[in-house]
Amino acid sequence: MGQHQHLNKTAESASSEKKKTRRCNGFKMFLAALSFSYIARALGGIIMKMSITQIERRFDISSSLAGLIDGSFEIGNLLVIVFVSYFGSKLHRPKLIGIGCFLMGTGSILMALPHFFMGYYRYSKEANIDPSENSTSNLPNCLSNQMLSLNRTPPEIVERGCVKESGSHMWIYVFLGNVLRGIGESPIVPLGISYIDDFAKEGHSSLYIGTVNAMGMIGLVFGFMLGSLFAKMYVDIGYVDLSTIRITPKDSRWVGAWWLGFLVSGILSIISSIPFFFLLPNPNKPQKERKVSLFLHVLKTNDKRNQIANLTNRGKNITKNVTGFFQSLKSILTNPLYVIFVIFTLLHMSSYIASITYIIKIMEQQYGRSVSETNFLLGILALPAIAIGMFSGGYIIKKFKLSSVGLARLGFCSATVHLLSQVLYFFLICESKSVAGLTLTYDGNSPVRSHVDVPLSYCNSECNCDESQWEPVCGNNGITYISPCLAGCKSSSGNKEPIVFYNCSCVEVTGLQNKNYSVHLGECPRDDACTRKFYVYFAIKVLDSFLCAIGLTSYSVLVIKIVQPELKALAIGFHSMILRSLGGILVPIYFGAVIDTTCMKWSTNSCGARGACRIYNSTFLGRAFFGLKVALVFPVLVLLTVFIFIVKKKFRGKDTKVSENERQVMDEANLEFLNNIEQFASSTEE
C-alpha cells in the first residue's frame, strides 16, 4: 500500500514537473516570437523613413504629400490602439499579436505592389526606358532641338498620353499599405509587454522587456544596412539594361529599389506571425489559474438568481467605469503640471520627428551626399549614439535616484543642447549651387533675384529649348546648367561614357582661359569647404542624438511622477495619443510644406502638372528647416523652466512617497487583472 502511494506521488511529481516545463517553454517561445516581431517591426519602420524621398520621386509628388504618406502609419495605429489596449488583455493575446504581425506584413507588401504595375521609371521626358533601347541617344542639344521643334507632339496626343500616365496616383496604395501596417503594429507593444508583465517570474519582467527592445535595435541596424544597399540599386533592376541608365545615385532624379525593402520587411513580418498562433493564452502563473478555477467552481454551485445579480452588477460597473473614465480624464487635463508636460514634450518630439523624416533630404541637398551614403552613416554612427543615450539615461536616473526636479533638469539640459545644435547648424549651411537659369543668368555672369521665369540669354535663345526639362550638366567653369540645350551645346560624344557635350556657347561667354567650352552629364559637385562643413555637421548630429535620447528617457519616467498613481496608465496613454496625432501625423506634413517652398525647379509630367522637386535653394532650405526647429525647441526651455519652478513648490520632499505609491499601484493592478480574468471566465461560462 505504501509502495502504491509512493508511486502515485512520484507520478504526480513527474506530471507537475512536466507541466511546469511545458509552461516555461511556452513563455520562452513567446519571448522568442516577440523578439522576432520587434525586429520585423523596427525594420519596417526604418525602411519607411529611409524610402520617403525615393517614394516622393518615384510617384512625382511633393514633400508635403510624401509626409502625409509617412504619417499614415500613425493614422492606422490611432484607429485601433485604444480598442486593442482595452479589449486585447481580455482575449487571446498571442493570437492577436500574430494577427497584427500578419497585417503589418501584408501592409508592407501592399506598399511595394505599385512598382510591379507602374511600368518603367522615367527620370526625364526623353528617357522612354526600354530594356532594348539605349536611352543616351535621346539627349537633346542645341542643334537637334532646333530640328525637333518643327515636329512637336500635337496637344491632343499629349492629352491622351496624360490620361495614360495617370498611374502616378498609385501612391494611394502606399498610403493604404502604411495605414494597414500601423493597424497591424498596434497590438504588438501593449499586449506583448502586458503578457510579459503578467507571466514572467517575479522581478524578471524588466529584464525581458529590455531584451525585446534591444532586439528591436537589431532590426534598426539591419534596416539601415538594407536601406543603404537597396538605395544603390536602380529602381527597375532586373528589368532594364543598367548600361542605358545615364544617372547616378547622386543625381536628384535617382530612385533606388525602394520596393525591395518593403518586400523583405513584409515577408519577415508574416513569418514572425506564425509562432503566435500556436502559443497558449496563459503559459504559467499557476496561482492565477488556481484562482480562476476556484472562481469557476464557485460559479457552477451558485443558483440562477446569483448569476442574474452578477449580470446586473456588471452592467452597473460598466456605467460606473465609463463615468470614472471621463472623471479621470478631466482630472489629468486640469492638472497644470501634466498639461505643461504634454506641451513641451510634444514640441521637443516634433523637432526630433522632423529630423528623422527629412535628414536624408537635408544631407542630400545641403552637402551633396547620396541616399545610400546617408543611410550607411546613420546606421553605423547615429543609431548607436541613440541606443547608448537611451541606456545612459536609464543608468543616470537609476544611479542618482533622480527626483521629479532632477528628471526635469535632465530634460532641460537635453533640450538646451538640442537648441544649441540647431543654432550651430545655421553656420554650417552651404551656399546654393551656381545654376544657370535658377541662381545665375544663363550666361553665368550675373546672379538673379528670383529663380522664377529667368529670361533666356543670347547664348541659347536660338536653340528652342524645352525649359521645363531637367537634364543637368556641369560646365568646366563650375556652373551647373539645366540641360545641354540651355547650355548652348552643339555636339556630344555620343554613347561613350562619360557623356560630354562640346561647343557650348553659354560656357564660352564666361571667358574660360583654356577655351574648352564643354560640359559633362550631372550636377557640379560641392566644393571642399562644403564637404568640411558636412563632417562638422554630422559630428554635432551624433552628439545631439545621444543627448536627445537621454532627455527622452527622462520624460518617460517623469510622466508617472506628476499624476496620481491610479491615473498613471491613462496619463501615459493620452500622452502617447497626443504625440502620435499632433507629432507623428502632422509634423511630416507641415515640415514637408515648408521644404516645398524652397524648391527652385519642379519636375513636370506629360500633362504639365507639377511633380517632385529636382533642386532646392539649399541656403533657404537650411534656414527654413533649422529655423522651424528652433521655433519648436525654444518654447520647450521656457516651459521646462516654469515646470521645474512648479514642481519644486509642489513636490518638495515628496518624491519618495510617490515611488512607494507606484509600487502599491502595481500590486493593485495585479489584483485588478485577476478580477478581469474572473469576469471574463464568468461571461464565458454563462
Image: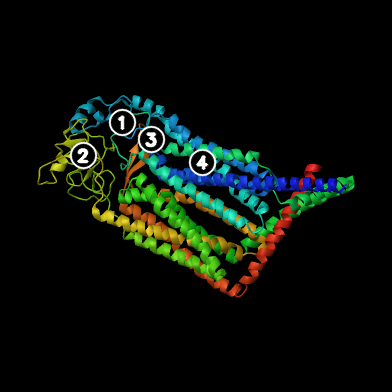
First in residue order: circle 2 vs circle 1: 1
Residue 129, position as x, y percentages in the image: 33, 29
The disc at residue 520 is 2
Q: Helix, strand, or loop for circle 1?
A: loop
Q: Residue at x 39, y 47 (%)?
A: 375
Which numbered mark, 1 or 3, is in the foreground of this view? Answer: 3
Label count reads 4
Q: Is residue 556 left or right of residue 168?
A: right
| Res 89 seen here | yes
First in residue order: circle 3 vs circle 2: 3
For residue 607, above or below residue 286: above
* Residue under label 4: 178
Instruction: Give whichever of 369, 457 is nearer the camera.
Output: 369
Question: Quick one: label 3, few (<14), some, or many (20+) residues within 10 Å?
Answer: many
Q: What separation in Å lies between label 2 and label 1 (alpha carbons)?
A: 18 Å
Q: Residue at x 50, y 47 (%)?
A: 42
* Three-letter amino acid code of the residue under disc 4: Asn
**Callout 2 touching callout 1 (CB < 8 Å):** no
* Three-letter amino acid code of the residue under disc 1: Ala
Q: Helix, strand, or loop for circle 2?
A: strand
User: For residue 257, what is the image quadrant?
Assistant: top left
